[in-house]
Every structure is written in structure tokens, then in C-alpha cells.
Amino acid sequence: MSKKHIIVDPITRIEGHLRIEAVIDENNVITDAFASSTMFRGIETILQGRDPRDAGLLAMRICGVCTGTHYQRSIEAVEHAFNVDIPKNARLVRNLIQGALYLHDHVVHFYHLHALDWVDITSALKADPKLAAAEALKWTDTPHGAGEGDLRTIQERVGKFVKQGRLGIFSNAYWGNKHYKLSPEQNLIAVAHYLQALDMQRDMSKMMAIFGGKMPHPQSLVVGGVTCVQDIKNPARIAQFKSLLNKINNFIKNAYLVDVLMAGTVYADEALDGTGAGLKSYMSYGDFRLNDNGFYNSELLFPKGVVLNGDLSKLYPLDQTKITEDVSHAWYEGKDDIGLHPYEGQTLPKYTGLEKKEDGYSYLKTEEKYSWIKSPLYDDTRVEVGPLARIAVGLAAGDERISKYATKFLGELGRTLGLGKAAPASVIFSTVGRTAARAIETELMGDVMMEWVDELAANVANGDLSTWTDFDFDTVSKDARGYGMAEAPRGGLGHWVVIKDGKIENYQAVVPSTWNAAPRDYKGRLGAYESALIGTKVADPEQPLEILRTVHSFDPCIACAVHIVDTKGRELSSFKVNTSCAV
């Protein structure tokens, strides 16, 4: 049997550095795969010995994308340790900041990180703008920015870049690959929305900054609540947030959802046969409190729980004590078995490098350690996290709101496929389904945020201006431990803190890309990325578009999982910040 080893390093259009190695057989089908993060994270070590009230400001630097999520999880871990709950206004403000991050992250991910796995830019240049405008009307009665004039302008704009040899971010791609299936007109619609989404990105950042103070790295969250009192008191600020949200929701419903439906229809065969399904076991920590019954007792927008083996008829309750991190195949010292719970977790680098091969390439030592990401386990089981996991858990829980939005999309997909009924729920267990789940969730989030913004305005109008819960730090901080477990846009995110004598003794963050991008565990079981690639057919091994498509469907954020450091302790560089600047 002839086999070929494919190395994709780095995987581009992601946050951070990721390497994928895959083995394909004589039919170009992937038979084995390995995911390796090539940078080390040391934030947990940096936090040791610090005041726990400052942890959030440092922990948010774990990532440059979902900064506010790490910020909030860290603060919630300390609040849990101190048994401090927050006022209603603080709950709503946090929901709105996090919700805006979801909208931003999901729209940017689809168009600017993932769409070019489905959309051929060069094909769009061959489209007839008039036919493309007619095509847009097949998918929705109210297409966003897809009139004949809009599309012609976009096509001419991109065409000028091509003629000048200035493709920029569109250069060095696999244009013309046989696995691109959209028609030229469909490609032109998607390219137009790609460029329009750049403007939406700016508006979504403004939304986060209204209550967060700035974007990225918001500043308005503190242990006990939020500090943006003047913003919630000002009706103009709330009105501005709502106006931007209306604009974004229009784009989500008439561009984003439509484009995903269009792609899902064209690539329906891969959704139906489960290409890219992977583990088919899912976990959600739950998130977005809907009432004020305490952090871990409130009703949640996204339910918590575990779904195993794609069985949506049964939901297992979530128990955080069953979470461990295995380092058998990760570049760390530690137990070579099920590993440690995050309260006892360690961050002890043990880099063993790559091995040299005779063909001149360096390959991962896949039988040994081969990634800077640990392998998290839930009850000694590998699970996937993220939008697909949240939709799966929501369906298994019988959640009315999630079921409504998922059923609506599956109904539309069934209609466009001519099935005469909704597409089966099993289509979500695929690369296409993982991408669709993110879009379904985005529409849901945009709509529910309208409810939250109105609830905040009404609560303030009734005279409630409370944004913070007072607590006696000297009393509560001596010896404590707590966790903040909720959902980042990319999946379940947990921060665990152990406090001794008022200082952080141990700190561990288990992030979405730790769950999904992890290497094999102590039993040799594959991580989510690795598992999802098995069985995928590659049209052209020299252009492994299919690998990118499936890996991108998880929205990798490897910066969340790693940070660079010299393993020998040498200084990499030094910086001096001048805090006084003459104008």
C-alpha cells in the first residue's frame, strides 16, 4: 500500500501557530493525523504569587481575540472563590459584552478565516453580476448588498487587484482546486459579503467598547461586578449599542446565514455522509445567565452537559471534578495517565523536539511528545467543544430556543435540497455542520441580545444603578479556591484558581483549543482535530484544501493555548515603555 505524509505548517488564517501532519493512502484518503501546537504558554506561572483581584487583567492577555472572555472567566473564578455574586446590571452588561464578542468572532471567523476554504476568489471574477444578483434572490428575499450594481463594483475592485498583482491576503491560495464547488455567481456573492464584513467588524468592536471601555482588552469588569456606571445611566449609550446591534443583525440574517445555507446546500453530500465529524462527543459548560439566582444556579441561555457518541437522545450532567489534563504526548512533565485536575495542575515544560528524517524534513515524534497543548479529558473521555457542541447539548437538553433556531435552519436546508422535509439533525456532525452551527448560534445570539439591552434599559429606568457587590477582601481571601467555567465563542473555557494567604498559589486555564487541538492521550486516543481529519479524501495532496477546511471549521485559536518562551530561560528581548509623551 502506497502512503504519503503531508505536512501543513503553519496552518494559516488562525490565531497562533499550528502544525498538521497527515498520512494518506493510495486513494488520497487520510488514514492518520497529528495536530501540534508549536509554542509554549506560561501565563499560569506568571500569575502565581499575585493578588487574585488582578488576575483578570493578566489572564486576558492569554489571547488577543477573545480577550474579554478570559477576563471574565478569571474574574468569575475569583468571585466563586470568594462567594461573591454580582448585581443584575452587571450580569446584563457582561452578557452584552460577551454577546458582542460572539457576534464579532463568528462573523469574522466565517468570512475572514474560513470562507476561502469554500469560496474561490478567482472564480468570482468570471461571474455575471446580473446572474449573481438573481442567484442571491434564490436564497433570500432581502439579500444584503448583493444587487447587480453592488456585485459589479466588487468584481471590478477585486479584478483591479488581480491585474496589478496585488492579491495580498488572497495570494498563494489553492484557487482552482477541484474541491471548490460554488458557481462563479455564488462565489461573487460570498466575496462581496467578505468585504462588507470588514465594515461590520468595526461596528461590532464599537459595541464591545461601549460597555467594555475599549476593544480588545476591555477594562470595565472587576471582581464583584462592572465599573461602567456612567454608560448604563446614559440612554444615548444604550441606544447606540442597540442601533449597532440592529445593523449587525441585518447582516447576520441576510448575508451570513444565507451564505452558510448556500454553501451547506452545495456541499450537502459531505454533511450527509459526515465528513469531518470526528469524535461526535460534545461538552458545553453552559453560559449567559438569564436570571439572578447565583452564578451556578441561574437558568442559562446555553445549557450545560455532555453528549456522547452523537446520541442526542441523552444528556449527561456536567461535573467539573471529572476534568483532568493528560501530558503523555505534550511537551510537559507530569503523570503519563489520566492526568491532574486543574486545581492540582502543573505547567512544567519538557521539550523533546522533532526528529530528522532522511528526506530532509523534520517530522513529529508521534509516538512520544509532539505538542505544547495538553490533552484534556472529561471523565476519561475525549470531547469536542465549541458552537457545534453547544447546539448538540442544547438539542439533547430539549432547549426550546436552541431547538427553534436549529430546526429553522435545518428546515431551510431541507427545502433547498428538495427533501420535502427538514434535513436530519445528524448533518450537524460534519465539517459543514460545524460551520452551520456557528451561524445558527450567531442568529440566536443577535436576537437575544435585543432582549438583554431592553432589560438593561428598563432596569436602569426603574432606578436601579447598582453595578458592584461590596466584599471584605481581607476576610474572604486568606485561603480559597474557585473556578470560572463558561463558554468562549470557540468553546468551553475554564479558569481555576487556588488562593493562599491572599495570593494566587496555583492557576490553570483549560481553553477551547486545548480541548480541540490536543494531541493523543495516554491511551492513544485522538484529539478532536485529529479525529475529524480521519477518512477525509484529499483531491490534490499538493493542495490539501480539505485539511484546512476541516481544521478551520473549529476556529483554531492556538494563541489561547500557547505563548512563546525560550525553554533555556534566556531573555528573548526587552522593552522600555515611556509613559510620559509630549504632544
Image (spheres, grey):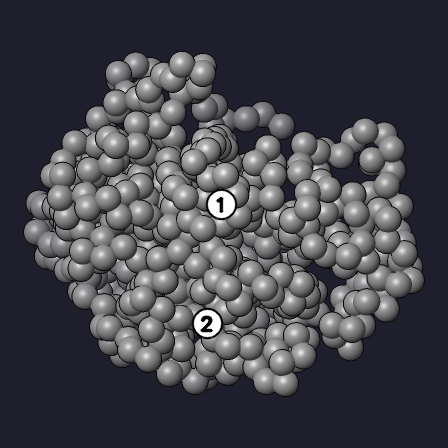
As drawn, is 195 to the left or to the right of 545?
right
Residue 95 occupies quadrant: bottom left
Disc 2 to disc 1, C-alpha distance: 22 Å
As drawn, is 200 to the left or to the right of 477?
right
Q: Secondary structure at mark 2?
A: helix
Q: Is residue 82 visible?
A: no
Which residue is pictured at 30% across the width and 57% down the height?
A: 383
Q: Secondary structure at mark 1?
A: loop
Q: Position of residue 500 (x, y in %)?
A: 9, 46
| Residue 563 circle label | none
Q: Is residue 179 visible?
A: yes
Residue that label 1 marks: 29
First in sequence: mark 2 vs mark 1: 1
* Quadrant location of the C terminus in the rendered image: top right
Residue 288 occupies quadrant: bottom left
Residue that label 2 marks: 426
**Amino acid at circle 1:** Val
